[in-house]
Amino acid sequence: MSLILFWGAVVLIAYTYLLFPALVFLRSRLSRRPSKTADITPSVSMIIAAHNEANSIGAKLDNLLALDYPRDRLEVIIASDVDNPTLGEQGAAAVFGPQKGATPDDVRRSDAPLALASTAGLAWAARRELLARHGIYDACILGTADRVMAAAALGRFDYGREAILMNGRQWQHYRLWSDPFFKSVQGRVGYVEGRAFHLWHGELRDRRYHERHEGLGRYNFDPFADVALDAGGPWRWNSDKPAMHNYVRDYFAQRDEDGVGRRADQASEPG
């Protein structure tokens, strides 16, 4: 009985490591299937789960951007959570609004100037080397960039997303800038008290802080494709979306920042 078991084990081992590979090889030679080859570049989503990865996320993004793959076929999704001790009543969040101890709504609500009578800072300053390294985030084509950048400095990227109602492409574009920016800033934001002389350039109610971003959302604004840098440096339209272009133009016209419309209305009022 033991002899049968021994030779049975030998046969199984021989079949597994010798006979079966030989049969597969012979079949591949005798019964080949036709195959086709072509250049295939499917859409690829790279998902990064990060928690307190400020010291390494920038290098990871640089590595992804260096991949030899069509940029328009590559999507980067970052699930990030940051424990930032600089937030709170005694932390850097106090830069928002004239009073100390700003709430999250003062940071993330684009309509805070009207609804809460608070601002995202009336004037900002940064070290020259910081701006030289990262630049400013200027893809908020209707405004609110100061709030979005402040959220990035504090590591509260979700606040920036909520402030301008970012769609997926806007979120991806923002995170490519905000993550390395926060890696450099690390929530180190201070403030000085005082008064700022602010020249009038339109009524606050005409800014339509929240509604403007809702309106832009109808056109699926894509900062990767819809705008491009002109030779002189400013943004220019780069897509065939005339309805969106008209919406943006009309929005800035109705802001009436030079007061022409306001003065015309006053002149037409009965004396």
Image: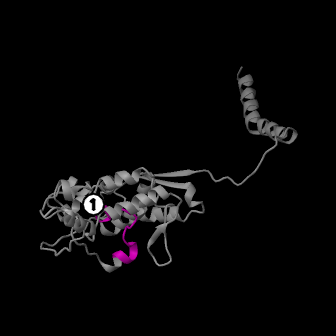
Q: Quadrant of the N terminus?
A: top right
Residue 126 appears left or right of 114 = right
**In the image, residue 108 lies in the stretch drawn in magenta:** no
Residue 259 x %, y %: 25, 69
**In the image, residue 131 lies in the stretch drawn in magenta:** yes
- Front residue of 8/58: it is 58
Q: Is residue 206 visible?
A: yes
Q: Residue at x 64, y 53 (%)?
A: 41
Q: Is residue 164 visible?
A: no
Q: Quadrant of residue 10?
A: top right
Q: Amino acid at mark 1?
A: Arg
**Figure colour scheme:** one colour
Q: Residue at x 71, y 29 (%)?
A: 9
Residue 242 x %, y %: 49, 58
Q: Residue at x 70, y 23 (%)?
A: 2
- Check the image and report above or below for 28 versus 164: above
Q: Secondary structure at mark 1?
A: helix
Residue 149 x %, y %: 31, 64
Residue 203 appears left or right of 136 = left
Q: Residue at x 40, y 64 (%)?
A: 139
Q: Residue furthest top?
A: 1
What is the magenta range? 130-148
- Front residue of 254/265: it is 265
- Front residue of 228/136: it is 228
The residue that mark 1 highlights is 207
